[in-house]
Each structure stands twice: as C-alpha cells, then as structure tokens.
Amino acid sequence: MTRPSRLRGLTLALVLAATTTTGCGPFGASEDAPVELTVKASITDKSAMDAVVAEFHRLNPDIHVSVAYADADTLQEQLPEDFRAEKGPDIFTVWPGSGNPASVTALEQDGLLENLSLRRFNLTMPMGVKRVTDVNGSTYAVPVTFSGIGAVFSMGALDAVGGEPPRTWTELLSLCQTARDHGKVLFAVGNATPWVTQLISYALVATTVYADEPDFDRNMDLGKETFAGSGWRTALRKYMDLDERGCFNADPLETTYEESLDQVATGRAVGVVQVASVLSELRAAAPDLTLRMTALPAGDDPEETRMPGAVSAAYALNPGTPHRKEAFALIDFLGSARGQNLYNRSGATLPAIPNTSFTVDPAIKEVAERQKAGTTVPFMDQRWPNSAVQRTHFAQVKALFAGTTNLDAALAALDRAHGERP
C-alpha cells in the first residue's frame, strides 16, 4: 500500500475515533448479511482471544469474527507472504519491536500496517509500551498483554516431590535431582517447535546479562558489546548444564510445544519454562492444576534475579481490509479496558495498557510484583536490529542440543547475525 493511501486511512481513523464507542453497546444493526472479519492469532493466545471475540460479538451481533490460530513460527513465516499475495486477514497478531519478520518494524517498513495513532487507546498507553508498538513516532499496533517468561510450576507436582520454587541456581539444580528421584523431570522442553528454543535462554540472560548491564542492547548497537564476550555465554552454558543434569525430558528436539504441555498436565513434568499465556492452555487441558509462575534463577543472589517481562501479544490492522469500520471497532475493543481485562483474565497475563479495574491472577503475582518493582527486562528479540538474530538463535540452540556445534561457534553466529542490516 502506498504512503498516500495510508494517510487517507489515517484521516478515516480520526473520524472513527471521534464517532465510535465500541464496547458500550451494539455496533449498529444492518439489514445486510453480517460482516465477516478474519483474524489470525497465536495458538498460545487462543483462550484469551476466544473470550474477547465472544464478548465482541455479543456487543456487535452484526459482526462475525473468524479466528485462525497458528504457532508463532508459522505466523512469522506466512503473514508477510499472505500480505504480499493480497490474502492477508483483516486483523492479525504482530510482534512488538523489531526482532522477527512479523514484527511491527518489519511489517511497517513494507507498508503492511494501518496507522493507529489516532485511536483512543493511545491516550492511556504508557510510553514504555509505545517503544515497541511505534515506528518513527506513529503507532501501528494495539498491545494487549504484558507477559513474563519464567518457570511455570504445577504446585501439586512440586508438593509431591517435596520441593518449592527455587530462588537460586544452586536450589534449581538441587530441585532437578529431587524431581528425578521421584520419577519426574523438572521441566518439559519442546524444542521441536522452533520458537520454544529461545525461552530458557531469555529467562537466564535476564539475569546473566541485564542485571549488571541494563543498556546491553544499546551497547551492542554501538559495537561496545558482543554475544560472545557477554553473559550470553554464561546463559547458554547454563542452558546446556540443565540438559546434561537431567532437568529436562528425554529428547527435547523430538518434543513439540503441545507435547511439553501434556507432560505437565499429566504430571510427568513438574513444570515448563514458558510465557505467561501458557497458563490458560494448561488450565484448559487440566482444570484441577494449581499453577505458579516464578523467575528462573541464574545465580545465587536472589536480589540480582531478573525476569523477562514485556508486551507480548499485540494486534495490527490490514490497511487493505474491505471492512475498515468493523475492523477498527475490534481494534478499539482490544484497546479498551474492558477488552484488555477480558483478554488478560482469560490468558493469565497483565494488561499492556494498565487500568485500575483489573484483578491479577494469583498464578502471576510475581510477574505483577516485578513489573511494579522494575525487575523485569524486555524480551531480548524486541530490541534486536533485525529478524536474522532470532532465526539464528533458534538454529544455534537446536545445534547445541544436537551436538553439531559448540558455544564458541554458536555465539559467533549470533554476532554475525546481529551485524546484518535489514
């Protein structure tokens, strides 16, 4: 889509922002057939998005929303291709920041996102959030969740082995042995699903890198730091140490995301290292589970422990949609307090646009406390200069698990990828 046509869309957005109050009543009856909106979203957000769609349809019975769910790898590959083939959905998941092919920055550079700067949700969106939804001062996504990455424990399974959530690296290693002694593994790892490979790295790097150097990403951009010469080396070594000590299930490279959750749901694994939205999927599979999310410790000083915490789910609007009025209505609902609370209440996450009426899920109490205390760090890929770093990270973790590379080669590959420019 050309820039002039996007400016015309922005003018229409201003008119709609002034006249539309989605979420307060029916969108408006029509004698014509109901409008069909198409949405593509991540499978990890299915419970949350289903709840939002059901309420949106109740408020707007003349708008039907059809959601297609896929895993992150499929979405990141297919969304850009769909749009270039003019087959893009009306509304779709977009990744905050710049770290993959379906990120806000990457898709906006190709002219594939509607400008949302004049939508009402922008009035209350925190500046820290806008850093990963905006490009050159304009907003191209509505953020809906603030999520953490950490250890999600089945408290029943943890009690059964006589353990408690570890606060130090030493306690973590000890808990691995305790779980094995009781015929379980501590963490189910589904590294057959590429995007899962990054999560333990991120959980550890939050402490091994960012506790001491919060400006690490800026220093990387300035050429003052490298992956190879930083706490990334420590984190990847610890990642492999956990595998070698039997903390994970057998054959992580042969285990999918879905299979890893099944191991937790059936009690074969005590927990999983995942994003907070996984709680809703585990609850759907095993409603009797009591779950708790904590930071994954990477050192022996709990005061130094950090947790990755950032905007997770966000949605964008196709500038070529034939249903602009209805699509803006759904975008506005996602950005409203009502939509944010519903999405996060179902998904066990926090609203990306905070409001006073939200009740925090007890399972993510630590995420909320860390958000308030400032002991979270952004998801690493949100601040990388290109999508090649994330793809390389996936591949190098897989190679480390397969034994076809070593730490030096893996870190060198990451440094080369970081030097690429889009």
Image (tube, rainbow, N blue to C red):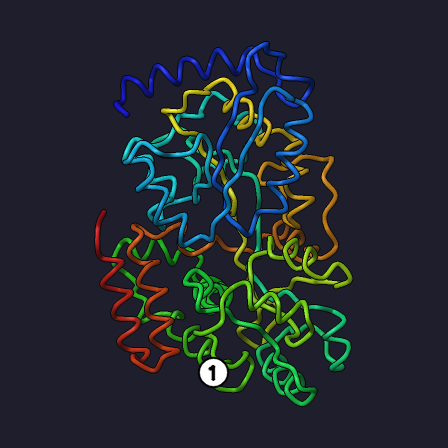
Residue 414 visible somewhere in the drawing: yes
Give the residue drawn at x 42%, y 33%. 89
Of helix, strand and loop, which one carries label 1? helix
Q: Is residue 284 above or below residue 295?
A: above
Q: Is residue 232 above or below residue 25?
A: below
As shown in the figure, which amino acid type bears the numbered disc 1? Asp
- 167 sits to left or right of 155: left
Give the residue drawn at x 44%, y 25%. 116
Residue 311 visible somewhere in the drawing: no
Q: Quadrant of the N terminus?
A: top left
Quadrant of res 209: bottom left
Quadrant of res 413: bottom left
Q: Position of residue 218 (x, y in %)?
A: 34, 52
Residue to which mark 1 is pinned = 241
Q: Position of residue 167 (x, y in %)?
A: 64, 73
Badge 1 crowding class, 10 Å Cα cut-off, few under 14, some 14 to 19, many 20 or more, is: few
Number of marks in the rendered image = 1
Residue extending farthest bottom: 181
- In front of the other: 116 or 401: 401
Q: Position of residue 333 (x, y in %)?
A: 60, 27
Q: Position of residue 307 (x, y in %)?
A: 55, 60
Give the residue drawn at x 49%, y 71%. 255
Q: Is residue 146 above or below residue 185?
A: above
- In front of the other: 31 or 343: 31
Residue extending farthest front: 33
- 258 sits to left or right of 356: left
Give the residue drawn at x 56%, y 31%. 65
